[in-house]
Amino acid sequence: MIPYYQPHYPTAAEELTVPQHMLAQPAMPQYGINFAATPQDRRDKKRKIDAEYRQRCKVKKEKREIELQHLREENALLKRENEFCREENDSMALKLRSKEVEIGNLKSEICNSKKVISKQEILLDTLSQKPFLQQIMHGCNRLEVALLENERNILYQDANWDGWESERKQLLDEIEKLKHRNVMLKMQNQVLGDKILSQKDTEASMRSHAIASLVEDSATNLSVCL
């Protein structure tokens, strides 16, 4: 036998009952809209939004003013640097022109020095030729012999024949002294000639080295400036 259950039918009061959490709360917005906000609340909210917007605009404006001030200072600094670079460029151009003139003068001096050295070399080659020196020495010897003969003749005419032996010895000693003196003079002339040639070679070498060093220093300064 199947049991029988009597169905339950809700009453009218139960049908109209809605859960509390599903009911709209007073003064609370539903779905993001506050239906209970008054016009004054809306005006206050608008004033607040406007104030916040003005504050943001003010902050942005102050930030732009600071950035503009930085840009002005940077622009002034760049102008000063540009003016300094322009002055430096003008000074460098003047220095370069001065260096060009100096290098031209050095080149001219080098050419003149080369000409002088060439003439000195020709003169030294001419003086170093043996026939020419022999001719000079032969002329000096002939002159010395002529002077000795003249002096001997004078002594012979004024000689005291009573003391001939002693006089003869004195003359021979004098002749030996003169010969020795002649040899010493020849040696001194040779040493002096060698010294002159060596000094000229040294001066020419020092002059060439000094000019070359000056040209090198000028070229180095010119490259650093460039």
Image (tube, rainbow, N blue to C red):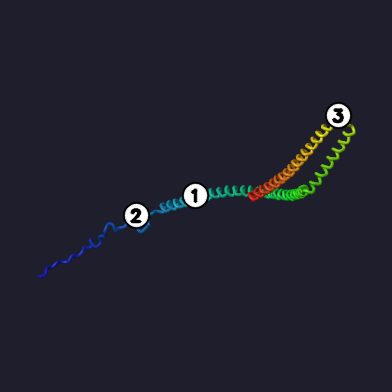
Query: Which amino acid type is shown beneath numbered disc 2?
Result: Met
The residue wearing badge 2 is: 28
The residue wearing badge 1 is: 59
Q: Does any portion of residue 157 appear in the rendered image?
A: yes
Q: Locate residue 225 relative to residue 40 in the image: left or right.
A: right
- Closest to the observer: 59 or 45? 59
Marked residue nearer the N-terminal end (2 or 1): 2
Q: CA distance from mark 3 to mark 1?
A: 137 Å
Q: Locate residue 206 relative to residue 28 in the image: left or right.
A: right
The residue wearing badge 3 is: 163
Q: Residue furthest left?
A: 1
Image location of residue 207, percent across then percent down: 71, 45
211, above or below 11, in the image: above
Residue at horizontal 59 percent and vertical 47 percent from the top: 77
Marked residue nearer the N-terminal end (3 or 1): 1
Q: Locate residue 106 relative to residue 6 in the image: left or right.
A: right
Mark 2 neighbour class, 10 Å CA radius: few under 14, some 14 to 19, many 20 or more: few
- Closest to the observer: 90 or 33? 90
Image location of residue 158, percent across then percent down: 89, 32
Marked residue nearer the N-terminal end (2 or 3): 2
Query: Which amino acid type is shown beneath numbered disc 3?
Result: Gly
Q: Secondary structure at mark 3?
A: helix
Q: Which mark is residue 129?
A: none
Image location of residue 105, percent across then percent down: 73, 49
Q: Secondary structure at mark 1?
A: helix
Q: Secondary structure at mark 2?
A: loop
Q: Residue furthest top?
A: 162
Q: CA distance from mark 2 to mark 1?
A: 35 Å
